[in-house]
Amino acid sequence: MRLVMFIVGHIVLLLCGTNVVHGNESDEGRLESALISGDEVTSPIMMEHLDLASTQTVDINIQGTFQLIPARDKSRYSLSATNVINQIANKPQFILPVLSFDLVQNDQNELIPVKRELQVSQHDYWDYFVGVGKIGIDPLNKGYYRIALPLSLVEKNQNCVHNGVVTFLVDQQSQASHFYYQFSSETCAYFKPDLWGVGQVAYQPSKIDGAPRIIQAYQHERSLRMTSMPLATLADNIAGLKLSQLMLQSSIQPAEMSRVGVVYQGVHYVSNCTTRMGDYPFCQQQVLPSYSTAKSVFAGLTMLYLEQRFGDVFEQPVSKWVEACDTKTWQGVTLADLLNMTSGHYGVADYGADEASAQTLVFFDALTHQDKIRFSCQHYARQSAPGQQFVYHTSDTYLLGTALSHFIKQRIGKSTELFKDILVDTVLADVPLSPVFTQTRTTADAIQQPFVGYGLFYTADDIAQISQFIQRQTQLSQSKALLAQPLLSQSLQRTGQPSGNVTEYDYIRYSNGFWARNFTNQLGCKHSAWLPFMSGFGGITVALLPNQLTYYYFSDTHQYNWASAVSELNKIKPICQ
C-alpha cells in the first residue's frame, strides 16, 4: 500500500472492434507470430484473442512442471499520466518474474495449478498467483494445443493486484512454443500499467503426486460456489433499477472498476471484469486485494471470535502482549482501543491525516516485524486518553495482530497461528473459500507476522461468501453464535441506535473494524438507517445491508461515495426498518 500517489487522472485508450489491426497485421496474427517465432509485440492485444473459445475435447493430457522465462528485451509497458513517476525504463516492475508451477488437467479441458495460493518469488518487485486455466485446439496451428492461464501479479510486501493472461502452445511431443503475457487491468490506485511481452517455456511432463485429489478438490470447491448470475440480470428483474447507478458510472470509468456485485436471496449477481483491452476472460479467477477490508474480515472477526471464546480479549492491555509497547505512554490502552483506532497516540487529531502522511511509508515499506513494531509503538506520541479520539492508523491494527498472536499462543498453544488456525480454520471454517484466500501478507522474516490490517486476497465469490457468513451470524443467539453478541450487533448497527466512534463526518462512524454511514434522510426512513460497510484503499466497499443483502465494488480511483447505489439497492428490498 503506497500512500504517496500522483493522481492526475488516468488516461485510457479505448480500442473498438473485435480484431484490432496494427499496420497490416491483426491481433490474431501478432499473437501467432509471438507464440511461434517469439516476435516482439509492439502494443497490447485485445483480451478476447487471449481466451480459448473451443470446447472440443482434446486428446492430450497435460501434467507436469512449467517454467516461463520472460525475454527482457521484448518486455513492454505503457503507463498513464497517473504514473509519470514510473516513466523510467528497466525498472523491475516492468519485467515479469520467472514463473514456475505444476499443472494437472481434468476431463473438462481445465488446467489446475497444484498451488493456487500466493507464490512468493525471487523477483525484486513481484509475487504472483496462477489460476485455473484452459487447454484447447489451436485454430491457427494444426497439431498444436493452446494453453491460456490467468496470472495475477502482486507487488511485494504490498496488496496491489494486476490481473492478466499468459498463453502458449504445446504439442503431443511435449514441445512448447514461446509464451505471450499481457496485463491490462489492476486494482491499484498508484500504478496502472499495461504490461506485455514474450518469453521461453520449459515443460517437463511428470506424474504429479496427488493429481486425482487436486482435481477432485477443485471440483468440490466449484460445486460450493454461490449461484451467480450477471449483474444485468438483476436490473432486468427489478423494475426501475438502474445498472449504471450500481456501477457508479458517473464517478468511476469502466476500466477502473474491477468488479461490482450484489448478493440477494442466495444469488450472487456480478459484473464483468472490464480491462483497457476488453473483458477479462478469466473473471471467476480474478484476484482482488483486501486492503483495509482486512480490518473488518481479519481484525474484527478474529477479535469477536476470541471475545466469544474467552470473554476478556477486548479489555486486554496492549502493554501486556506487546513488549515493545510496555512503556508508560501505552498504559491503559486496550486491544479494543486498537481495534477502534482510539489508542490516544497520534500526530494530528484528524482521522486520516496521519495515515496519508509520507512518514507512514516507513511502516508500509518495512519488511521485518522489528521495524514495523518499532514504528507502531514509538512513532506517535500519547496525546489523549484511550477510547476518546478516533485517528485512523493501520499501524494500530498491526499492533493488535501482534498482541493477538501472543495471546492465542498463551491461551491456546504455542504453535497456534492467528491467520491459519484462528481466522481460516476456525472462524471461517464452514465458509467455502478459494485457495486465493488461504495465504496472507506477512513480514519477510522468521516471525512472519500477518499484517492483519491489509494483505488479504479474495475472489468475488470469497467476498460474497464472507459477507453472507457475517450476515448470518447476526441472526444467531449468543449461545449459538461463533462471534460475540452484542458486540457484533453494535459493529453492524443492529441495536436500533447508532454505535461506534464519531469521525470528522457526522454521518460516518467506526465500530470494531467496521464503518457505518447514515442513509436515513436519503432513503426517507422513519427510523435511523445506519448501514455498515467495510472499506479499502483506492475505492473498495463491501456493504452489509438489511435483508441479507450485500453490495460491493472494487475500484482504484479513490471513489468512496456509493450513495447513488443505495437508492437502487432500496428498490431490490426496502432498507428502512
Image (cartoon, helix red, strand yellow):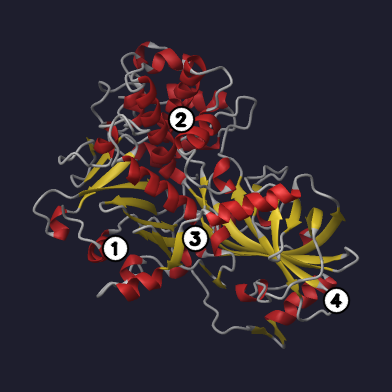
Observer-side mark, 1 or 3, equals 1
Looking at the picture, which amino acid does disc 2 mark?
A: Tyr
- Tell me residue 372's x, y (percent): 52, 28
Residue bearing the label numbered 4: 143
Q: Secondary structure at mark 4?
A: loop
Q: Quadrant of residue 477?
A: top left
Position of residue 18 relative to residue 136, above or below, is: below
| Distance between mark 2 and mark 4 Cα atoms | 54 Å
Q: Residue furthest left?
A: 526
Mark in front: 2 vs 4: 4
* Location of residue 512 by image quarter: top left
Q: Residues within 10 Å of mark 4 (few under 14, many from 20)?
A: few
Q: CA distance from mark 3 to mark 4?
A: 44 Å
State which tag comes first along the sequence, 1 or 3: 3
- Looking at marks 2 and 4 on the same chain, the residue that comes earlier in the sequence is marked by 4
Of labels 1 and 2, the one closer to you: 1
Please indicate, yes or no, whether residue 357 appears anywhere in the rendered image.
Answer: no
Residue 153 falls left or right of residue 34: left
Tell me the quarter of the picture where residue 147 sits: bottom right
Q: Nearer the viewer, mark 3 or mark 2?
A: 2
- Give the SS element for disc 3: helix
* Disc on res. 565: 1
Give amino acid for label 3. Thr
Q: Earlier in the sequence, mark 4 or mark 1?
A: 4
Looking at the rendered structure, which numbered label has been put on residue 82? 3
The number of callouts visible is 4
